[in-house]
Amino acid sequence: MTSMMASRHRWIYLGAIVLLVGMLVTGLLTYNQLHQTNEANRKAEQLGSALSAAGYPVPTQNQIVHTLGEDGGAVCEDPADALKQAQWNYGMSNGASGPGQRPVLSDREVVFAESIVLSVYCPDKLAAIKDKIADLKLDDTVRN
């Protein structure tokens, strides 16, 4: 009879331990997710302030958080890479395709907006991109 009682208690103890470990894992995951959300909101607010101070239109904080997250997303993935540079150059064209495509002088302010994003989300990569920006032919082409 005592062995039957001990066997029942063992299952209760094992069940309680499994339940506590499950609650611990859930708590840790929730804490990490909340920490990431707070960090993303803090950086989005910082970016919004920097863009506003520079005179740029500012997207909503939700848009910034969903686009850039806490680490800058695609913007911070090796911004000085040759492929990113080619995408930049492609984006700074007249929009035609094939033989009609021509490079244009992009607006200085549009190009410098990315350096503001990099200064908030990945400041360690800002120096490399500033060298690339310095090599571009830019002008004041957008009218206010």
Image (cartoon, rainbow, N blue to C red):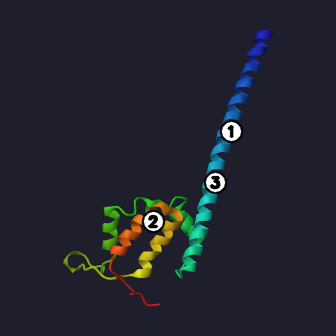
Residue assigned mark 3: 35
Nearer the N terminus, badge 3 or badge 1?
1
Q: Secondary structure at mark 2?
A: helix
Q: Report how far apart the C-alphas of labels 3 and 1 lie in the structure.
A: 16 Å
Q: Report how far apart the C-alphas of labels 1 and 2 lie in the structure.
A: 39 Å
Residue assigned mark 2: 126
Residue assigned mark 1: 24
Nearer the N terminus, badge 1 or badge 2?
1
Q: Is residue 5 left or right of residue 138?
A: right
Vertical comparison of 122 with 141: above or below = above
Vertical comparison of 4 with 134: above or below = above
Q: Residue 84: x percent and y percent?
A: 35, 64
Amino acid type at circle 1 is Leu
Residue at the left extreme, as displayed: 99
Q: Is residue 40 left or right of residue 128?
A: right
Determine whether label 1 and label 2 are within 8 Å by CB. Answer: no
**From the image, which quarter does the N terminus lie in?**
top right
Q: Secondary structure at mark 3?
A: helix
- Residue closer to the observer: 119 or 83: 119
- Nearer the observer: mark 2 or 3; the answer is 2
Q: Residue 38: x percent and y percent?
A: 64, 59
Determine whether label 2 and label 3 are within 8 Å by CB. Answer: no
Which residue corresponds to the image point at 40% horizontal and 63% vertical from the top-left? Answer: 79
- Nearer the observer: mark 3 or 1; the answer is 3
Vertical comparison of 78 with 108: above or below = above
